[in-house]
Image: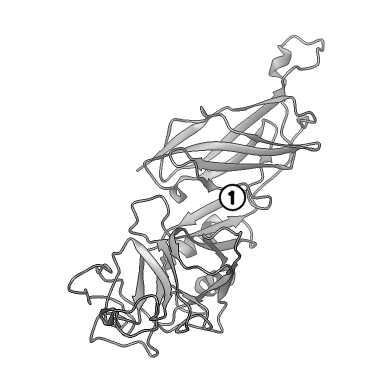
Amino acid sequence: MAVYKIFPEKDTFILSQFPAQNTGRDEILEVANYNGINILSSAQGDLPAVNRALIQFKTSDINNVVNNIITGSAFQSNFKLYLASAENAPLDYILEVYPISGSWNMGTGRVSDVPKTEDGCSWAWREKSGSAAWTTAGGDFYTDKSGSSQTFLYTSDKDISMDITNMVKLWNSSSIPNDGLLLKHTSSVEFSASYVSTNYFSMDTHTIYPPEIEFKWDDSDFDTPLTVVTSSDFIVAFTNVKEEFEDTAIYDFRVKARDTFPTRVFQTSSIYLNSKVLPTSSFWGLKDVKTNQMVIDFDTSYTKLSADSGSNFFKVYMDGLEPERYYQLMIKTTVGDETLIIENKDNYFKVVR
């Protein structure tokens, strides 16, 4: 199974309160509705007011993944943003994403700039203050071209993970130009009496949580003469972990399994060398060592282990990981009625530039 990530070439958020302000170098993307009740100062501009985020990924990166890296025609593409903070978020809410219609300039502003920077995209302008205006203030976007949405419930994870596969296919086929995507609250929230602010890490963040598109597809192949583990009393070892990988590397990690106490048989070699493989209900994942956060989570459709005549294995694309960080290899497997998470703190590696 395969997972591949790409990161933005530009992003910003735009504010109806300040139609010419640019925030292209801000570390946060704010998607919000200010109602004039919680914020009363006239210095805040016209209220109620709305903030929307714009994010664009390179067409060449998208085409390279879809045309050259993914094996087969079936894949899934998820747009992912990581929540930094939220204020007054309702128990349940919906965010929407649409493909942008028309080019725009990221700019160099930050929301805290005094005076306000106006050298890039804003609520009123595509490029900079006084240049080409959006046809509709707040950004032009296709409402009939494979938009997506995500519903957030009180108990659900507040990070964004939206399926934008159809949008990616439109960009890849040149059915519509790739001018990025626009993230917003629903029309029932925007310019309403509601007050909600959701803040996400931008590409300028100093964390490991920049925006991303995560591509997933099935490249697994379970074809092995080896015996499959049937008891939960077994040992797993990664046999070819290196200390470091360059961020351009593509690597097959090998995973060998054997019974903890093998059945004694007559043979000339040690019975402890008799390898087995983990069952088809086995999956891999990666965890950031410092933050303890899953970078690639176990996925029953897209992170299955493969198996051949030697062992289980899986492929990792290092350029989809943040460089200069350490990652721990993990396995999740179900043997009989028992599900096990296998994580040995010695099984880690670093991605370097």
Vertically, is 113 above or below 48? above
Vertically, is 130 above or below 169? below
Residue at image point 53% right, 55% down = 69
**Left or right of 255: which side holds 115?**
left
Residue 294 vs residue 91, the one in the foreground: 91
Picture quarter containing residue 335?
top right
**Residue 158 image offset from top left, x and y in percent:** 53, 60
**Left or right of 154: which side holds 123?**
left
Vertically, is 322 above or below 255? below
Residue 205 vs residue 266, the one in the foreground: 205
Q: Residues within 10 Å of mark 1 (few under 14, many from 20)?
A: many
Query: What is the total number of numbered labels drawn onto the structure image?
Result: 1
Q: Residue furthest bottom?
A: 135
Question: How was the colour assigned to the protein in this rendering?
Answer: one colour
**Left or right of 336: which side holds 329?**
left
Picture quarter containing residue 205?
bottom left
Residue 37 vs residue 293, the one in the foreground: 37
**Residue 74 image offset from top left, x and y in percent:** 65, 62
Vertically, is 352 above or below 1? above
**Residue 244 image offset from top left, x and y in percent:** 42, 34
Picture quarter containing residue 140?
bottom left
Q: Quadrant of the C terminus?
A: top left
Residue at image point 41% right, 64% down = 199
Residue at image point 43% right, 82% down = 101
Which amino acid lies under the numbered mark 1 shown in the image of this protein?
Ala
Residue at image point 53% right, 44% down = 316
Helix, strand or loop at label 1? It is strand
**Residue 242 image offset from top left, x and y in percent:** 47, 30
Location of mark 1 (residue): 2
